[in-house]
Image (tube, rainbow, N blue to C red):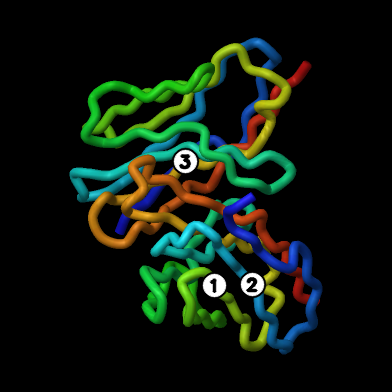
Amino acid sequence: AQTVTQSQPEMSVQEAETVTLSCTYDTSESNYYLFWYKQPPSRQMILVIRQEAYKQQNATENRFSVNFQKAAKSFSLKISDSQLGDTAMYFCAFTPIQGAQKLVFGQGTRLTINP
Amino acid sequence: DAGITQSPRYKITETGRQVTLMCHQTWSHSYMFWYRQDLGHGLRLIYYSAAADITDKGEVPDGYVVSRSKTENFPLTLESATRSQTSVYFCASSDVQDPNYGYTFGSGTRLTVV
């Protein structure tokens, strides 16, 4: 069974700082996708970034980037120049490419950006 | 705007009552999912469906029933609600043919069982 672990229940940084959220996962699959989702107070689940395991290059989306370490099964999210609007719950998630497309989520990290 | 519609957005029900949460998608995605979100647990899969008339259990299926007679609808029923089923419920869909391999989520239903 696949598992995803986010070891930081809460984090808090000042606006404009850089923050890194940690995620580790466990799987025997060789091909899979990893995701970071943002959930603001509105409850909407918003895709932040996606990484394909067979791609060596780390994914980036504007101020968001990941550090994907396949051998270590680690998938951290870095937010640069943090903004007040980044305040949200962040979830790391995994799905294997083969078989049912079930997303497995971590426990979440509550990120607060302070002015 | 096309996507996933969940209803109701909020629901309060009494212990022992049956309640159905609705989910409707307009993408014609083959896969649909029900998750529950609880503090400290993230989102946990209740049931999923690969196509109409094909459903399977997820991680926490006890006390829930699903059906999928049409591709676009995937209702979740709590047969006899318990306080432990107080949670936020999310419906989601995905399509293996989507090159972006994306998931679409509904806005969630906050269910309170009193």
Q: Chain of mark 1?
A: B
Q: Look at mark 3 in the image and give the residue it sits on.
A: A92
Q: Is B109 in front, or is B112?
A: B109
Based on the displayed image, in which of its 4 quarters is residue A110 positioned? top right
Which of pointers 2 and 1 lies earlier in the amino acid sequence?
2
Identity, as a three-letter code, of the amino acid under mark 1: Asn
Q: Residue at x 75, y 20 (%)?
A: A114
Identity, as a three-letter code, of the amino acid under mark 3: Cys
Mark 2, secondary structure of its residue: strand
Indicate which label's residue lies in the foreground, 2 or 1: 1
Mark 1, secondary structure of its residue: loop
Q: CA distance from mark 3 to mark 1?
A: 27 Å
Q: Look at mark 1 in the image and give the residue it sits on.
A: B73
Q: Are marks 3 and 1 in contact (CB under 8 Å)?
A: no
Q: Residue at x 59, y 53 (%)?
A: B2
Mark 1 nearby-residue class (10 Å; few <14, some 14–19, many ≥20) = some
Residue B109 as seen in the image, left or right of residue B94: right
Indicate which label's residue lies in the foreground, 3 or 2: 2
Q: Are marks 2 and 1 in contact (CB under 8 Å)?
A: yes
Q: Chain of mark 2?
A: B
Relative vertical location of residue B22 with respect to residue A63 in this rendering, above or below: below
Relative vertical location of residue A78 with respect to residue A81 in this rendering, above or below: below
Q: Look at mark 2 in the image and give the residue it sits on.
A: B22
Q: Are labels 2 and 1 on one chain?
A: yes
Indicate which label's residue lies in the foreground, 3 or 1: 1
